[in-house]
Image: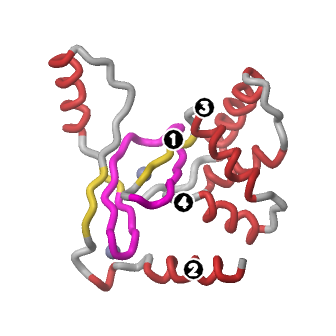
Amino acid sequence: MATPALQETIDEVKELFRTYLKTNGHRQTPERFTVLEEIYKADGHFDADDMYFRMKETGYRVSRATVYNTLDLLVECGLVQRHQFRQNQSYYERAYAYRQHDHMICDDCGAIIEFCDPRIFEIQSMMKKLYDFEISGHSLHFYGHCSDPSTCTRKSDLKKKEQRQDKE
Ligand SMILES: [Zn+2]
Ligand SMILES: [Zn+2]
Protein backbone atom coordinates (compact mmCIF):
# COMPACT_ATOMS: atom_id res chain seq x y z
CA MET A 1 0.00 0.00 0.00
CA ALA A 2 1.22 3.45 -0.80
CA THR A 3 1.74 5.99 1.93
CA PRO A 4 1.32 9.76 1.68
CA ALA A 5 4.31 11.63 0.32
CA LEU A 6 6.63 13.73 2.47
CA GLN A 7 6.17 17.50 2.38
CA GLU A 8 9.64 17.69 0.84
CA THR A 9 8.48 15.51 -2.06
CA ILE A 10 5.33 17.58 -2.47
CA ASP A 11 7.45 20.75 -2.77
CA GLU A 12 9.65 19.06 -5.36
CA VAL A 13 6.78 17.88 -7.53
CA LYS A 14 5.14 21.31 -7.36
CA GLU A 15 8.34 22.83 -8.69
CA LEU A 16 8.55 20.23 -11.48
CA PHE A 17 4.91 20.80 -12.40
CA ARG A 18 5.44 24.59 -12.41
CA THR A 19 8.34 24.20 -14.84
CA TYR A 20 6.37 21.80 -17.02
CA LEU A 21 3.33 24.11 -17.23
CA LYS A 22 5.50 27.10 -18.02
CA THR A 23 7.57 25.32 -20.69
CA ASN A 24 4.46 24.00 -22.42
CA GLY A 25 2.43 27.18 -22.26
CA HIS A 26 -0.23 25.90 -19.84
CA ARG A 27 -1.75 28.17 -17.22
CA GLN A 28 -0.44 27.83 -13.66
CA THR A 29 -3.74 27.96 -11.79
CA PRO A 30 -3.85 27.38 -8.02
CA GLU A 31 -6.48 24.64 -8.60
CA ARG A 32 -4.00 22.58 -10.60
CA PHE A 33 -1.50 22.70 -7.75
CA THR A 34 -4.18 21.77 -5.24
CA VAL A 35 -5.04 18.68 -7.30
CA LEU A 36 -1.36 17.75 -7.46
CA GLU A 37 -0.95 18.17 -3.70
CA GLU A 38 -4.04 16.07 -2.94
CA ILE A 39 -2.76 13.29 -5.19
CA TYR A 40 0.56 13.17 -3.37
CA LYS A 41 -1.19 13.18 -0.02
CA ALA A 42 -3.52 10.39 -1.14
CA ASP A 43 -2.97 6.80 -0.23
CA GLY A 44 -2.90 4.20 -2.96
CA HIS A 45 -4.80 4.12 -6.24
CA PHE A 46 -7.79 6.22 -7.19
CA ASP A 47 -9.89 7.06 -10.21
CA ALA A 48 -10.65 10.60 -11.35
CA ASP A 49 -14.03 10.67 -9.60
CA ASP A 50 -12.51 9.44 -6.32
CA MET A 51 -10.20 12.43 -6.43
CA TYR A 52 -12.99 14.83 -7.38
CA PHE A 53 -15.23 13.70 -4.49
CA ARG A 54 -12.35 13.60 -2.07
CA MET A 55 -11.55 17.23 -2.86
CA LYS A 56 -15.17 18.25 -2.68
CA GLU A 57 -15.53 16.60 0.73
CA THR A 58 -12.40 18.38 1.95
CA GLY A 59 -14.03 21.65 0.93
CA TYR A 60 -12.06 22.56 -2.18
CA ARG A 61 -13.94 24.38 -4.88
CA VAL A 62 -12.63 22.56 -7.86
CA SER A 63 -14.58 21.43 -10.92
CA ARG A 64 -14.68 17.91 -12.25
CA ALA A 65 -13.23 19.17 -15.53
CA THR A 66 -10.23 20.67 -13.71
CA VAL A 67 -9.54 17.39 -11.92
CA TYR A 68 -9.71 15.43 -15.19
CA ASN A 69 -7.63 17.86 -17.16
CA THR A 70 -5.01 18.23 -14.42
CA LEU A 71 -4.69 14.44 -14.24
CA ASP A 72 -4.02 14.37 -17.99
CA LEU A 73 -1.31 17.00 -17.62
CA LEU A 74 0.26 15.16 -14.69
CA VAL A 75 0.37 11.90 -16.63
CA GLU A 76 1.89 13.74 -19.58
CA CYS A 77 4.74 15.14 -17.48
CA GLY A 78 5.31 11.84 -15.68
CA LEU A 79 4.36 12.92 -12.14
CA VAL A 80 1.32 10.63 -12.11
CA GLN A 81 0.95 7.15 -13.51
CA ARG A 82 -2.22 5.91 -15.18
CA HIS A 83 -3.23 2.24 -15.01
CA GLN A 84 -5.95 0.36 -16.79
CA PHE A 85 -7.16 -2.67 -14.84
CA ARG A 86 -9.34 -4.98 -16.95
CA GLN A 87 -12.04 -2.98 -18.75
CA ASN A 88 -12.50 -0.62 -15.84
CA GLN A 89 -11.88 3.08 -15.83
CA SER A 90 -8.35 4.37 -15.40
CA TYR A 91 -6.69 4.37 -12.02
CA TYR A 92 -4.03 6.83 -11.03
CA GLU A 93 -1.22 6.99 -8.52
CA ARG A 94 1.73 9.22 -7.85
CA ALA A 95 4.86 8.37 -9.79
CA TYR A 96 7.60 10.64 -8.47
CA ALA A 97 9.89 9.36 -5.68
CA TYR A 98 7.90 6.19 -5.40
CA ARG A 99 9.22 2.67 -5.78
CA GLN A 100 8.72 0.74 -9.01
CA HIS A 101 6.05 -1.90 -8.46
CA ASP A 102 3.38 -4.08 -10.05
CA HIS A 103 -0.21 -4.89 -9.09
CA MET A 104 -2.55 -7.69 -8.07
CA ILE A 105 -6.24 -6.84 -8.36
CA CYS A 106 -9.18 -8.64 -6.74
CA ASP A 107 -12.05 -9.04 -9.22
CA ASP A 108 -14.61 -9.18 -6.38
CA CYS A 109 -13.80 -6.22 -4.19
CA GLY A 110 -11.39 -4.24 -6.35
CA ALA A 111 -8.60 -4.32 -3.79
CA ILE A 112 -5.22 -3.53 -5.29
CA ILE A 113 -2.07 -5.10 -3.84
CA GLU A 114 1.31 -3.71 -4.80
CA PHE A 115 4.31 -5.96 -5.03
CA CYS A 116 7.90 -5.46 -5.96
CA ASP A 117 10.15 -8.19 -7.32
CA PRO A 118 13.64 -7.45 -8.66
CA ARG A 119 13.37 -10.41 -11.02
CA ILE A 120 11.06 -8.36 -13.23
CA PHE A 121 13.85 -5.86 -13.71
CA GLU A 122 16.18 -8.73 -14.57
CA ILE A 123 13.77 -10.02 -17.21
CA GLN A 124 13.56 -6.53 -18.63
CA SER A 125 17.35 -6.20 -18.92
CA MET A 126 17.60 -9.63 -20.48
CA MET A 127 14.89 -8.95 -23.08
CA LYS A 128 16.45 -5.63 -23.90
CA LYS A 129 19.73 -7.38 -24.75
CA LEU A 130 18.15 -10.38 -26.42
CA TYR A 131 15.96 -8.37 -28.80
CA ASP A 132 18.07 -5.24 -28.95
CA PHE A 133 15.06 -3.23 -27.86
CA GLU A 134 14.87 0.02 -25.89
CA ILE A 135 12.33 -0.51 -23.11
CA SER A 136 10.68 2.64 -21.80
CA GLY A 137 8.29 1.06 -19.32
CA HIS A 138 6.16 -1.94 -18.45
CA SER A 139 2.87 -2.87 -16.87
CA LEU A 140 2.16 -6.17 -15.18
CA HIS A 141 -1.15 -6.90 -13.48
CA PHE A 142 -2.30 -10.14 -11.87
CA TYR A 143 -6.06 -10.62 -11.51
CA GLY A 144 -7.82 -12.93 -9.11
CA HIS A 145 -9.69 -13.14 -5.83
CA CYS A 146 -8.83 -12.56 -2.18
CA SER A 147 -8.42 -16.02 -0.63
CA ASP A 148 -10.12 -14.94 2.57
CA PRO A 149 -13.59 -13.47 1.93
CA SER A 150 -13.46 -11.56 5.21
CA THR A 151 -10.58 -9.46 3.86
CA CYS A 152 -12.53 -8.33 0.79
CA THR A 153 -12.75 -5.04 2.65
CA ARG A 154 -13.15 -2.63 -0.18
CA LYS A 155 -16.65 -3.88 -0.92
CA SER A 156 -18.03 -1.29 1.49
CA ASP A 157 -16.03 1.44 -0.25
CA LEU A 158 -17.50 0.49 -3.60
CA LYS A 159 -20.99 0.61 -2.13
CA LYS A 160 -20.32 4.09 -0.74
CA LYS A 161 -19.21 5.16 -4.16
CA GLU A 162 -22.35 3.86 -5.84
CA GLN A 163 -24.52 5.74 -3.36
CA ARG A 164 -22.49 8.87 -3.94
CA GLN A 165 -23.01 8.59 -7.68
CA ASP A 166 -26.76 8.14 -7.19
CA LYS A 167 -26.84 11.44 -5.35
CA GLU A 168 -25.11 13.30 -8.15
ZN1 LIG B 1 0.53 1.02 -7.50
ZN1 LIG C 1 -11.23 -9.08 -2.61
Residue 98 screen position, x and y as percent: 47, 42
Residue that carries the numbered disc 1 in the rendered image: 95
- Which of the two discs, 1 and 2, sits closer to the camera? 2
Magenta extent: 87-113
Nearer-N-terminus badge (4/3): 4
Which residue: 24% across, 44% down?
A: 117
State if disc 3 and disc 4 touch (CB < 8 Å).
no
Left or right: where 53 falls relative to 6: right
Q: Amino acid at mark 2?
A: Glu
The local crowd at label 4, few if under 14, some if 14 to 19, many if 20 or more residues have their Cα within 10 Å, is: some
- Residue 77 is labelled as 3
- State the CA–CA distance, disc 2 to disc 4: 15 Å
Residue that carries the numbered disc 4 in the rendered image: 46
Q: Is residue 100 magenta?
A: yes
- State the CA–CA distance, disc 3 to disc 2: 32 Å
- Which of the two discs, 1 and 4, sits closer to the camera? 4
Q: Amino acid at mark 1?
A: Ala
